[in-house]
Image (cartoon, rainbow, N blue to C red):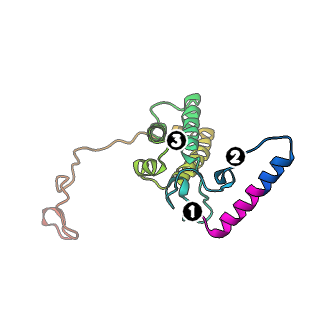
């Protein structure tokens, strides 16, 4: 609902426009209030979708284009991995690919519903997810530049430990096997 002041201003503008139209050679006969309205056609729900005015996080502005940006940035991560010489078996690559593909799918399936994307990704607001993609790109640049996947060595895992307690962890602190005292 527009205030009476807003209606008076709009009426004044419309009447001036109407007088100017009559005086000019252009024939403008139908000027509506909606043409001068700053209000969008559809009703906005405060705090949701296009009605969101704040992220509630200092320094992080609302971005109504965050969902498409997510798709672009996470696809850039996948493209960079594909162009790299990092082996497909690298755990870092596996993790980044899974996260990026999941977030791209969530964003593509919910282009007009940022709240659904946030709920599916469960890692913050869509604006934060865009920042996370930017940060991951920086980490990936370091990872690729330093070839850190070459530093990760395989670890032998002992599946059947031969501890004194049989690997069950049932020896209490201070107890020694076979009743030995130290």
Which residue position holds label 2? Answer: 30
Closer to the observer: label 2 or label 3? Answer: 2
The residue range painted magenta reads 1-15
**Label 1 belongs to which residue?**
54
Q: Residue 151 shows which numbered tag? A: 3
Residue 161 image point, x, y percent: 23, 48
Q: Position of residue 101 (x, y in %)?
A: 46, 37
Secondary element at image label 1: loop
Left/right placement of residue 172 relative to residue 95 reads left
Q: What secondary structure is marked by label 3? A: loop
Q: CA distance from mark 2 to mark 1?
A: 38 Å
Element under disc 2: loop
Residue that protrudes farthest toward the right in the picture: 24
Foreground: disc 2 or disc 1: 2
Residue at image coords 13%, 66% = 179
Q: Would you say the magenta stretch is mainly helix, strand or loop?
A: helix
Q: Is residue 4 magenta?
A: yes
Residue mark closest to the camera, 1 vs 3: 1
Q: Earlier in the sequence, mark 2 or mark 3?
A: 2
> How many other residues sit within 10 Å of disc 2, few (<14), some (14-19) or many (≥20)?
few
Q: Whole-Å distance between the Cαs marked 1 and 3? A: 43 Å
Q: Is residue 20 above or below residue 11?
A: above
What's the residue at 79%, 56% (across, down)?
A: 16
- Marker disc for residue 117: none
Number of residues whose C-alpha sits closer than 10 Å to that of mark 3, classed few (under 14), some (14–19) or many (20 or more): few
The residue drawn where x is 81% and y is 53% is 19
Name the side, left or right, on which 78 lies relative to 23. left
Q: Point out the residue furthest to the left here.
A: 179
């Amino acid at each position: 609902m527009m205030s009476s002041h807003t209606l008076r201003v709009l009426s004044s503008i419309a009447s001036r426009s109407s007088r100017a139209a009559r005086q000019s050679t252009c024939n403008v006969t139908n000027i509506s209030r909606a043409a001068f309205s700053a209000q969008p056609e559809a009703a906005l729900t405060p705090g949701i979708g296009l009605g969101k005015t704040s992220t509630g996080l200092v320094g992080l502005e609302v971005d109504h284009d965050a969902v498409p940006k997510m798709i672009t940035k996470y696809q850039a991560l996948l493209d960079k991995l594909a162009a790299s010489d990092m082996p497909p078996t690298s755990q870092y690559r596996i993790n980044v690919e899974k996260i990026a593909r999941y977030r791209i799918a969530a964003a593509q399936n919910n282009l007009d519903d940022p709240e659904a994307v946030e709920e599916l990704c469960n890692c913050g607001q869509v604006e934060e997810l865009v920042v996370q993609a930017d940060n991951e790109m920086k980490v990936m640049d370091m990872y690729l530049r330093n070839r850190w996947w070459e530093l990760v060595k395989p670890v032998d895992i002992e599946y059947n430990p031969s501890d004194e307690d049989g690997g069950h962890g049932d020896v209490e602190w201070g107890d020694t096997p076979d009743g030995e005292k130290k």
